[in-house]
Amino acid sequence: MPISVALISELDQEAAATSKLLERVPQDKLDWKPHDKSMPLGRLATHIAELPGWGKVTIQQDVLDMAGFEPTVLGTVSEIVELFDKNVSEFRDTLSGASDNEFMKTWTMTYEGKEVFAAPKMTVVRSMVMNHLVHHRGQLTVFLRMNDVPLPMTYGPSADETGGF
């Protein structure tokens, strides 16, 4: 099986679970945060929506300099969901066109021209995109729970949805 096929399967599963959570972000709580050192709920949700776009960039570029990076700022939940859907679609399309050899190429993150780290694109897609997405999705579930938002099933039943289990 080509690497891209396996990654697309994983992306589809994780995107479906993530989309259900993003849709439940309360519009009136975008500025809420559980702690002074935490990012606001809206920023966290937007960061999650950005992450699939990083997968596209990882495959299409061999080097990314983060010095010019500016996080996306969105004002509504619908904009966040739209960005996520767009980025998932574009990442999926990029994955489908990538060869196994492309995934073995080295990808390098730099800051002002200085190397921060380098790894095979496959490693970057799994760790800095997919695992990163799941990590922040976990944070999002806590933020939502703390605001009494019912949580959907992800890998199985939640305390709010059993899905027939």
Image: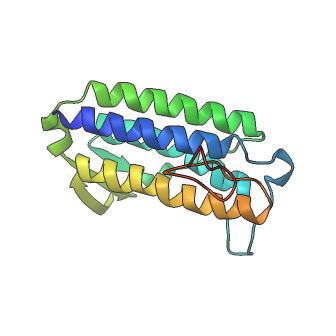
| Relative depth, front residue between 60 and 94 | 94
Q: Which quadrant of the view contains residue 8?
A: top left
Q: Is residue 84 left or right of residue 143?
A: left
User: What count of labels does the image hold?
Assistant: 0
Q: Which quadrant of the view contains residue 33?
A: bottom right
Residue name at image x 65 percent, y 35 percent: 81
Q: Position of residue 159 (x, y in %)?
A: 66, 59
Q: Is residue 149 left or right of residue 14?
A: right
Judged from this view, the residue extending furthest toward the front is 165
| Relative depth, front residue between 38 and 22 | 22
**Colour pattern:** rainbow
User: In the picture shown, does residue 16 fall above or below 129?
Assistant: above
Residue name at image x 43 percent, y 35 percent: 12
| Relative depth, front residue between 100 and 25 | 25
Quarter of the picture containing the N terminus is top left
Q: Position of residue 49 (x, y in %)?
A: 57, 43
Q: Position of residue 104 (x, y in %)?
A: 15, 45
Residue name at image x 57 percent, y 36 percent: 84
Q: Is residue 4 left or right of residue 144?
A: left
Q: Position of residue 28 (x, y in %)?
A: 87, 49
Q: Which quadrant of the view contains residue 115?
A: bottom left
Is residue 40 shown to the viewer in this render? no
